[in-house]
Amino acid sequence: MPQHRQIPWFGYDDIQGRWALTHGEGIAPHSHEQGQLLYAASGVLATTTVGGTWVSPANRISWTPPHFEHYHRAYGDTEISILEVPEALCAALPAHPSVFAVSGLLREAVLKLTGGSTLRPTVADRLLRVIVDELTELPEQSLHLPEPVDDRLRAVTDRLHADPASPATLEELGRAVGASERTLSRLFRTELDMSFNQWRTLLRVQHALVHLVHGHSVTEIAVRCGWSNPTSFIEAFTAIIGQTPGRYQADLRHSRDIGSQTP
């Protein structure tokens, strides 16, 4: 991973528009008076809170409610479109950070609002309401990696963050941190609402998204992220992201081509 550089948050909410972040660049911890939608046209954008990390791959949109402290980090050169959502419209959206796929209508509405052209207030308001209406019809994507509170479980997840490809079993990790396999398995369920294997698979998929941004092959990524073979990687990635790694890379190239043509 790169050395991270944080952009300070300037403490105001009127930042609607398009921003470009380089690989490893981030926006320092902050919160908003309004809700915020960020559309990633390229790269991967991670939004982190005390409750974990939500990863927004290219052509996804992330949602952060008002007054929710968080920070962002980009993986790959990441172009984001930022929309502020007045509190009056926020009730229709989840009360926690979320990631959604982007329909064609949703994408065009976001780009229209953030493209720098002057729109009549009534037009801008209608477009924003269309965006919120579209999001209420879309399911949340399973891209939230929760983080534990228990010290024993955090010691395990810290080890996996440091080496996502580690083949260590939960029993082996338990011996390393001084906890039984049964205790750790219970903690994964009670604290994180998922099994050890589910959590590690999601961690690996998040890392795979970063490697895909850099154009690495499916076979290379499978090895780097700990899968025994490319087929296992493709199946796990497709189950979480909703498309194969190859299709995702093709969409990345398509989004970059469209972005280069968009004023």
Image: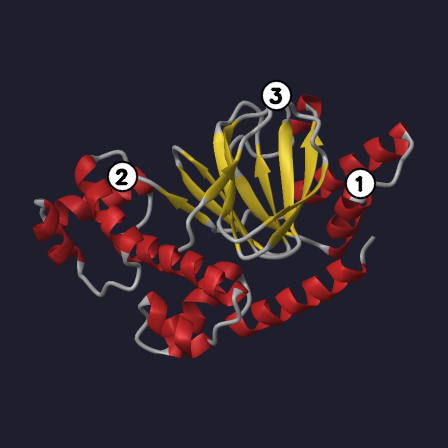
- In this figure, which residue is indicated by the disc labeled 3? 33
In the rendered image of this protein, does residue 225 appear above or below residue 145? below
In the rendered image of this protein, does residue 61 appear above or below residue 202? above
Number of marks: 3
SS of the residue at dot 1? helix
Q: What crowding class fits label 2: few (fewer than 14 Cα within 10 Å), some (14-19), or many (20 or more)?
A: few
Tell me what residue is drawn at x 49 percent, y 38 percent.
Answer: 6
The one nearer the camera, 167 or 117, is: 117
Task: Give percent across and percent down for residue 237.
Answer: 45, 65
SS of the residue at dot 2? helix
Q: What crowding class fits label 1: few (fewer than 14 Cα within 10 Å), some (14-19), or many (20 or more)?
A: many
Q: Quadrant of residue 14?
A: top right
* Farthest residue, direction right: 120
SS of the residue at dot 3? loop
- In this figure, which residue is indicated by the disc labeled 1? 113
- In this figure, which residue is indicated by the disc labeled 2? 190
In the rendered image of this protein, does residue 223 appear above or below residue 156? below
Q: What crowding class fits label 3: few (fewer than 14 Cα within 10 Å), some (14-19), or many (20 or more)?
A: some
Q: CA distance from mark 2 to mark 3?
A: 32 Å
